[in-house]
Image (tube, rainbow, N blue to C red):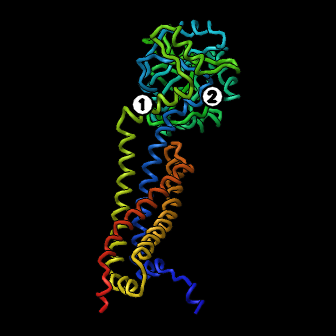
Amino acid sequence: MSFFKYRKIPLAWLLLTRQPLRLFVAIAGISFAGILMFMQLGFRDGLFDASVTVHRLLDADLVLISPRSKSSISMSGFPKRRLIQAMAQEDVLSVAPVNMNYLLWRNPENLKTRSILALGFNPEDSLLLDEDFSSKAEKLKNPGRVLFDILSRPEFGPIEEWFLQGKTIETEVAGKRIKVVGLVELGPSFGADGNLITSRETFLQLMPTNPRGSIEIGLIKLNDTADPLFVSSILNKSLPNDVRVITKNEFIEFEKNYWRDSTAIGFIFSLGALMGFVVGCVVVYQILYSDVSDHLPEYATLMAMGYRLKSLFFVVAREGFILALFGYLPAYVSGQALYSLIRNSTKLPIEMDANKSILIFILILFMCMGSAGIAMRKLVDADPAEIF
């Protein structure tokens, strides 16, 4: 007698598995909604991360930009002498002027042209946080030489393959002949499918309309003991208002904010994730509502036997939790596989991080528990008198 008293019957599990096909459909629907949310949020976060790939690699504590600049795809110029004026601040260790703009690259294999992001700097300066970059930059001192980003999309040609084979790679950028003398790893973004780095001298030859005394970015390195926020506030007060001094982290957020707030891309991906959530809610609600409706006589019998309505509510809630768990696992595995496929195909930095994994699980759990809560209203109709 005591055995039956303490033995718990997995009622929620038995109700779900009583009709395997319905359970399979529910799990498939929840998984599909989870995969849709994973993909939409993955693309959105990948967009933001890809848009600041170059920004993260810059060797700088502070960055000078024009107040008119909107993003890396719309950078305005400002006088290079502002960097010289910034050197008057005692905490400034070194400065580096950088030109940034889009130029037309000709694929040396099929001769098709494609826009590529070009960075021009003085080879004596430090540009990237790469210990081997200084040796590569030495090769840019001769005019007409560039470093090609091997993470660029394949439409720019088999540059890496040819270079490693020892072939001489010459092509055209902005209608002028250039030679690839080295490789770097930067990565494409939604704004740029590829990147190249060259000297300011070569950059100005490729883009003669750009004033020689104008730059798009100014990099500032500070002493180890200096506070970037404090120094940036001092420089903003002392320099003319045709420049804006921000920290490197603020420069990264400056770019992300453009894609998040000034374009429809971030909104579209967030809306897509919301649509996946709504689809999942509809599927789970239909399954749980049908399950409760089909078993109303059984629920009424349990109530006649002394079960309280609150206990039956918990049965439906456990069904929702089980569906959330079983629906999340295949969505997570499929998301990992699709992320890997997208990384290999597009070279975008789409990663399955812990924050995204937890967020999607919480959304699926809320989706299932919320649908269960709505379906519970049907239990109120479970009248014990129906069994007679």
At horizontal 54% and vertical 49% (from top left) the residue drawn is 355
Q: Pinpoint residue 52: horizontal percent, then vertical percent.
A: 52, 33
| Residue labelled with disc 1 | 258
Q: Is residue 119 left or right of residue 364?
A: right
**In which image quadrant can residue 174 be found?**
top left
Quarter occupied by the C terminus: bottom left
**Residue nearest the viewer, comparing 182 with 300:** 300
Q: Is residue 350 left or right of residue 379?
A: right
**In which image quadrant can residue 183 be found?**
top right
**In which image quadrant can residue 309 be found?**
bottom left
Label 1: element kind: helix
| Residue labelled with disc 2 | 182
**Relative to 208, residue 158 above or below:** below
* Disc 1 crowd, CA 10 A, few/some/many (<14, 14-19, 20+): some
At horizontal 62% and vertical 33% (from top left) the residue drawn is 163
Residue 179 seen in this snapshot: no
* Disc 2 crowd, CA 10 A, few/some/many (<14, 14-19, 20+): many
Earlier sequence position, callout 1 versus callout 2:
2
Q: CA distance from mark 1 to mark 2?
A: 32 Å
Query: Dots 1 and 2: beta carbons under 8 Å?
Result: no
Q: Pinpoint residue 171: horizontal percent, then vertical percent.
A: 51, 26
**Relative to 350, residue 279 above or below:** below
Amino acid type for the residue under numbered disc 2:
Gly
**Residue nearest the viewer, comparing 255 with 278:** 278
**Residue nearest the viewer, comparing 385 with 314:** 385
